[in-house]
Structure formats: C-alpha cells, structure tokens
Image: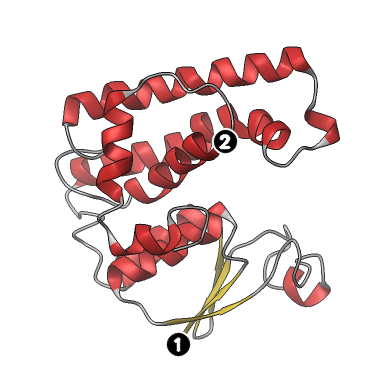
Amino acid sequence: MLKILGRASSINVRKVLWLCDELDIPFEREEWGEGFQSPKEEAFKALNPNALIPVIQDDDFILWESNTIIRYLANAYGGEWLYPQNPRQRARVDQWIDWQATELNTAWRYAFMSLVRHSPAHQDPTLLAAACKGWEYTMGILNQQLEKTGAYVSGDNFSLADIPVGLSVNRWYETPLEHAEFPAVRAYYERLTARKGYAAWGRNGTP
C-alpha cells in the first residue's frame, strides 16, 4: 500500500492526499513535520536528504517533491483524465503546476509567514506591504485565466493543476489581509468545494 509521510496540515502533503481521494488510491499516512516526528531525523533524511515533507513510499519506490509526486501518482494510478497524454494539453497543465510552485508560492511566502505563522523574522511593515501587493498581483493573473476558461485553471475540465492552485487559493482566502475582489477566483474557489477531495483536504487539511 502507498505510504505518505507528512502532516495533513502541510499544503504540500495535502496535494498528495487530495489526489489520492480523486483517484481512490488507498494509503497509509505517518505524521512527520512540525509538532510530530522531525524530518531532520536520520531515518527520514535517508529517504529525503532535504528533510522536507511529503515523501511517499510506493512499495520499494521512494519519491519526494510534492508536484513530482502528484505527477507520478496520476501516471501510475489511472489519472489520465487529470493529466492528459496529449502533449499540448499536458503542457498546459504543467504550466500552471509550475506557476504555482514558482510565481504564486514566492508571492505569498512573506505575507503568510508574517500574518499566519507570526514569524518574528517576517514583521517588517514595508516588506509585508510589498508582499501583499505582489500576492494580489499574482492572484490577478489567476483571475484573468479563470475569466478566460470560465471553469478551471487549464481549461474546461478539472485537472491535476487545480490541486496545487486550488490549495493556494485557499491560503489566499484564509490569510487575514485585505482581499481584492476577484470574482472569477471566488467562483473557482466555490466550484472546488463540490469535490470530495477538496472537502476533505482543501480547507487547511480539515473536513
């Protein structure tokens, strides 16, 4: 059986958990990360030298990096409807997965650490204001894309890209800051709530 190592409150672990629900993949999960077993333990670092969650063990196959994991699971467990084989369709899905990992994650990191984690190292008001502005800018890009598709981030149908992007949208709305009006993003956020996997894992890892 697939084993997932990581705490359910982690946004990166929740990508994997949500996908497992979408594909009906049975799994066992071990608690690793803040508040649980430390990924800095040598036993964990033998699986992932970066000491980061999640890690999966699929029989004797070990894999880390959350976006790589969800691509692997979609390929290995009948997820073609989420991650199409057609090169152009797949490239569009990959584009938005990678955008979430680079542009969107980078945009929200300082504001999230300041306003949610209350990190002492992230309390500079000038940097916080700049971070909030940058986060709003990237959410505006997402809003434009959703206005074009009228549905999901890579097109008419729910795809693998909607898992990381959808979790980041949850983070946007759950962070206590002034939120610009993005009607297409709001409609998308509500559209995702109809999915079983999102109901279980989308809102900060709680049903």
Nearest-to-viewer mark from 2 and 1: 2
Instruction: Tell me which amino acid carries mark 2.
Output: Thr
Where does the N terminus fall, quadrant-wise? bottom left
Where does the C terminus fall, quadrant-wise? bottom left
Residue under the point 19% across and 43% down: 89
Q: Position of residue 140 (x, y in %)?
A: 39, 20
Residue 153 visible in the shown view:
no
Residue 107 visible in the shown view:
yes
Query: Mark 2 sits on what residue?
Result: 175
Q: Secondary structure at mark 2?
A: loop
Residue under the point 16% across and 32% down: 150
Q: CA distance from mark 2 to mark 1?
A: 35 Å
Query: Mark 1 sits on what residue?
Result: 1
Q: Quadrant of residue 24?
A: bottom left
Q: Is residue 133 above or below residue 198?
A: above
Residue under the point 40% across and 64% down: 200
Q: Is residue 7 above or below residue 30?
A: above
